[in-house]
Image: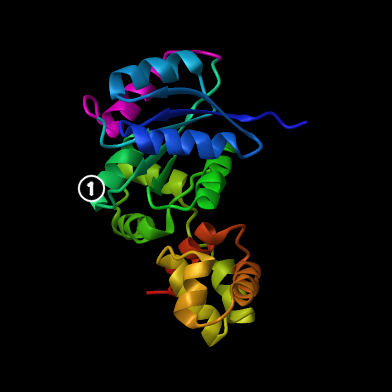
Amino acid sequence: METDIRITLIEDHDLTRVGMRTALQQRPGFKVVGEASNGTDGLKLMTSAKPDVAIVDIGLPDIDGIELTRRFRQAQAAMEDEPITKVLILTLQDNEDVVLAAFAAGADSYCMKDVSLDQLVEALRVTQEGNSWIDPAIARVVLRQARDTQPEDSAVVEFKTVSISAAEPEYNQIIEAYPLTERELEVLQLIVDGCSNAAIAEKLYITVGTVKTHVRNILNKLCADDRTQAAVRALRSGLIG
């Protein structure tokens, strides 16, 4: 039997926090082990509860989420033989400086607050497994920074290698061998824009079932495990500009 993913919620907006807790508790495989409405209490909670994943809002009233993440990573570095807590930033901010500062502070994943519950669940699972989940809506920011990074900028180079995989030559070979159709490219563009299957269906005047078929074909052709990875590979390879 799989162990539940233990989660702490650090969010100052009561309705948002309660809503996330209720939604996650109703999903099998997740257990909310603590909540805090400010950064000071959040830091204490993360240190004492030792969750698998901490969901951290950036806009906290005392210590912002980025500073909280930085302080927690410093404290965690001094704790030997302790399980590593992953940090998932959840925010409305997609500003480039904020996104990069969050990862530089030690965040593992970055998720927008308008994400669907299914996407949040996926992000938590991916993050708990030790991988980075990057919201498709900000993938462009990450990739642009990765392209522009100079080798001597060690802090950002580390961020780049941890957060996204570089485009391997075989990706382009795969794309050449299994080219996407015009419709698949349209769907892929909307995935990169952060649209849900329902939104894609509405925009393209097709059924959700047809969208799912296109998404499955896209994932297979790009050898991607999920929509986020497909978005990153599409941008990295130049399929989507």
Residue at 69%, 28% (x, y): give it. 3
- Choose between 75 and 41: the one closer to the eye: 41
Residue 172 x %, y %: 54, 72
Q: How is the image coloured?
A: rainbow
Q: Is the magenta stretch mostly helix, strand or loop?
A: helix
Q: Tell whether 60 sits left or right of 219.
A: left
Placement of 239 over or under 182, stated as above or below: above
Placement of 210 over or under 222, stated as above or below: below
Is residue 12 at all visible to an observer of this figure?
A: yes
**Which residue occupies the extreme right position in the image?**
1
Residue at 60%, 61% (x, y): give it. 224
The residue under label 1 is 97
Residue at 64%, 80% (x, y): give it. 177
Residue 58 x %, y %: 29, 37
| Callout 1 amino acid | Asp
Task: Give, as a single range, the part of the protein colored magenta.
Answer: 61-81
